Image: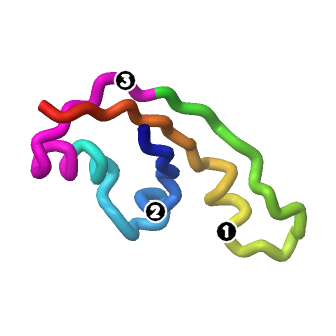
């Protein structure tokens, strides 16, 4: 199981399909992916990433060896 946030891809830090690419490189199979949106934990209106965090999705990957 792997919990992953797409915030890095929203900020152009990593590719959108980074988990899929890594799974392919290491001969792993993504069995299931569950996604959910979350609210930013920081309630401070000064948070410069607040709008990006609102767009972000948390994903739970179930991964097995091939």
Callout 2: 10 Å neighbours few (<14), some, many (20+)?
Answer: some
Callout 3: 10 Å neighbours few (<14), some, many (20+)?
Answer: few
Please indicate whether residue 13 sits to the left or right of residue 54 in the image.
Answer: left
Q: Residue at 82% x, 63% y: name it.
A: 42
Q: Are marks 2 and 3 in contact (CB under 8 Å)?
A: no
Quadrant (top left, top right, bottom left, bottom right) of the N terminus: top left
Question: In terms of image quadrants, where is residue 2?
Answer: top left
Residue identified by numbered label 2: 8
Residue identified by numbered label 1: 49
Task: Give yes or no for residue 44 being in the magenta stretch.
Answer: no
- The magenta stretch is 21-33
- Closer to the observer: label 2 or label 3? 3
Residue furthest out toward the right: 44
Callout 1: 10 Å neighbours few (<14), some, many (20+)?
Answer: few
Question: In terms of image quadrants, where is residue 14?
Answer: bottom left
- Closer to the observer: label 1 or label 2? 2
Circle nearer the N terminus (3, 1)? 3
- How far apart in space, not on screen, are marks 1 and 2 (Cα)? 11 Å
**Residue 23 image offset from top left, x and y in percent:** 20, 44
Please indicate whether residue 42 sits to the left or right of residue 34 in the image.
Answer: right
Label annotation for residue 32: 3
Label 3: state its secondary structure: strand
**Residue 37 image offset from top left, x and y in percent:** 64, 37
Instruction: Using the image as rendered, state which of residue 4 and residue 47 is in the foreground.
Output: 4
- How far apart in space, not on screen, are marks 3 and 1 (Cα)? 29 Å
Label annotation for residue 20: none
**Residue 4 image offset from top left, x and y in percent:** 47, 49
Instruction: Using the image as rendered, state which of residue 63 and residue 8 is in the foreground.
Output: 63
């Amino acid at each position: 199981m792997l919990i992953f946030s797409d915030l890095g891809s929203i900020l152009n830090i990593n590719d959108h399909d980074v988990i899929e690419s890594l799974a392919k490189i290491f001969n792993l199979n993504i069995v299931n992916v569950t996604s959910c949106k979350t609210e930013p934990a920081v309630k401070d209106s000064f948070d410069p990433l607040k709008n990006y965090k609102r767009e972000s999705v948390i994903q739970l990957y179930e991964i097995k060896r091939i």
